[in-house]
Amino acid sequence: MSWLAGHGIQGFDRLNPALGPLLNGRGDGQGLVIVGSTIFGGSFPGCVWPSGQGNALFCLPGGAGFRMKHLFRGRIWENRVPVQARLQKREEKGNWDENPSSRGHGWVLKMLIGLVREAIKRHEMVRPGDKVLVGVSGGPDSVALLHALYVLRGELEIALHVAHLNHMFRGREAEEDVRYVKNLAGRLGLPVTVREVDVPRLLKEKGGSPQEVAREVRYQFYREVASQVGANRVAVGQNMNDQAETLLMRLIRGTGLDGLAGIPVFRDGFVIRPLLGATREVIEEYCRAQGLEPREDTSNLKPVYTRNKIRHELLPLLEKEYNPCVVETLAKTADLLAHDREYLESQAEKAYRKLKFSLPQGYTALKIRDLLDLPLGLRRRVVRLAVAAVAGGAGEPGYGHVEEILSLTGRGKTGKKTRCPGNIWVVREAEHLVFGSQEPEGHGPGLVETRLVIPGETRVEGLGLVFRTRVIDADAAREKLDEVVDNEAYLDYNKLELPLLVRSRRPGDVFWPLGARGRKKLKDFFIDCKIPRREKEKVVILASARDIIWVVGYRIDERFKVSEDTKKVLAIYAKPYNEGANDQ
C-alpha cells in the first residue's frame, strides 16, 4: 500500500482505471492523496484524504466498491478550491439533464450510474428490447433506481414502466407518496400503474407479520402489472445497506448458508436488484444532486422492528467501535457466501437427480442407503429438494423439519412419518424415504415400485418377498383353481396391461374384489374383511398402470379372473425369502 502514497487518484487508476473518474469527475488526482494502510476488509484498503485536510472522505475496501464515510460533512476540496458554494449554485438550477456529469457532484452521479450499469451487465439482468417494470415506493432507493435506469434506457435499449402500491398503512402520508410517484413518472415521461391494497385488513383476516404480508402483496402486484404491460423484468431498489442489515438480522435469528447469502441480485429470472452494490449514502447523495427530493417513510425511523433497530442502533455501533466499513464487509461476505451456496446447490441438484425417482400420484422417493452416503450438508439440501418437488411452492422446511426427516433414516423406523410446512408428509418405507402432498394412510413398506418379471423371479427389496411367475395353458390352470391359496393368484393373461408392478397401497386405491358386485375402495374392503390396522400396514399390491390386479394374500380383481374364454393364465406365487417359492 505504501507505493500508493502521494499518487493521488492516479494510484488507484493502476488498480482500477474506473476509480479515478468516479472519484472526482476528472481522473487527474489533483488535490487528493492516498495515505495509510489500515485494513478495512478489502484487498487494497486505504483512505482518500483531501489534500491538507484531516477528515477522511472515503474508505476503500478492495473488491467491494467504496463507501463515503463523511460525505459533505464540512468542507470538501477539489484541486484545493472549496466547492460547496459552486455545487449549491448548480443544484438550484434544478434541471433534469440526462448527462450526470453536467451537474453538481458529478463524480457521485457517475459512480451510481456506473454501479447500476456494471451490475446489469455483469449479471445479464436485461437484454435489448426488454421492458422493465420499476417498483417505486417514493423513497430514495427506488427513486434513484428509476432515474438511473431512465438515464441508461437508451444505452441498454430497454423500455420502462413505473409501478407503485399503496399498502394503506400510513393514511395521508401514503397518499402523498402516490402523488409524488405519479408526478415523478410524469416528469420523466414514463407510464405508471398505481394500485392500493388494504394490507391492515388482510392482517386482521389472515394474521402474520406486517412486513411479510406487505411484501407478498407487493410482489403479487408486480407480477400482475408486469403481465398486463408486457414487462419481463421487475427492478427493485434494495441497496448495500439493506444487504448488510439482512445478513445481520438472519444471523441473529439463526440461519444457514442460504440465509447468510443475503439478498440475491437476480431472483427467479424475473426480479433484478441493480443497486445492491451502492450504499445508502451514495444513493441519497445522487437524489440530492439530481433534485429528486424523494419521500421519507417515517415507519423506517421507528425502532420497533428488528431491521430498524439494526439500521439505527447496531450498525452505527459496529461502524463506530469495530469497523468503519462494516457495511461493505458484510455485503462482501454475503456475496462470497452466495457463490459458495451456488456451488453447493449445484452439487445437491446433481445428487438429487441421481438419487430420486418419481412415483405415481405425485410421490417422490429417496433410497436411504444412497442418501446416507452423502456428506451431511448435501444430505440436508437433497431432502429440501425432495420436499420442494412435491410441495409446488407451498412451503419450505426449516432446520427442525429437515432434521426430523433425516431422523427417519435410522434403523427400525419403518412406518414413521413427519409433516413439513405446506402439509407435505414424509414417511419411512423400508429402505426409502417417501415424500408426498397427502398424509400417508398406513403405507406399508414397498411404496417404491418394482416391476414384475414375467416369466421369472422378482425379489422386492425391502419387502422380504419373492414373486415367481409363469404363463401356463388355461385348461391346466382350471384344474388347480380350487387349490389356489392366499399367496397364489391365477389371472387371465390376455386381459392384463403389462408391465405389472409390485407396490404398497395408496390413498384412493380402488378395485373390484373377486365375487363382489362392483368396484370398492380398498379402505372399505379392509373394513368389510375386518383386517386389523397392523395388518393393513403390511398389505402389498400387484397392479398395472391403471388397475389393481391383486391385493396380495387377500383377493384378485374380478375383471382379471380366469373364465371360460381364457386362453392363457399367468400364475403368480408370492413367498417370503426364507421360505422359498413353490415351482408347481
Image (tube, grey):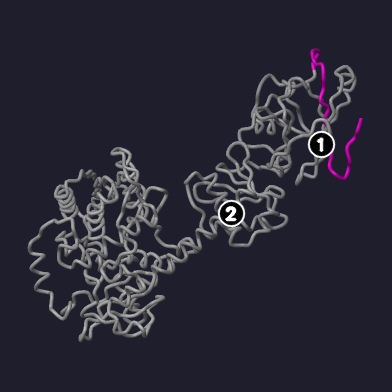
Disc 2 target residue: 382
Q: Position of residue 63 (x, y in %)?
A: 39, 70
Q: Residue at x 81, y 28 (%)?
A: 489
Q: Position of residue 449 (x, y in %)?
A: 70, 39
Query: Circle 1: is it few (<14), some (14-19), or many (20+) Cα within 10 Å?
Result: many
Q: Is residue 425 above or below residue 499?
A: below
Q: Is residue 288 above or below residue 505?
A: below
Cβ–Cβ below 8 Å for labels 1 and 2? no
| In the displayed structure image, the side of residue 548 where residue 478 appears, left or right | right
Q: Earlier in the sequence, mark 1 or mark 2?
A: 2
Which residues make up the magenta segment? 563-584
Q: Quadrant of the N terminus?
A: bottom left
Q: Residue at x 48, y 60 (%)?
A: 258
Disc 1 target residue: 467
Hey, which quadrant is residue 517 in on the image?
top right
Label 1, label 2: how far apart the Cα atoms are: 33 Å
User: Any magenta on residue 577?
Assistant: yes
Disc 2 on helix, strand or loop?
helix
| In the displayed structure image, the side of residue 549 where residue 475 appears, left or right | right
Give the farthest residue toward the right: 584
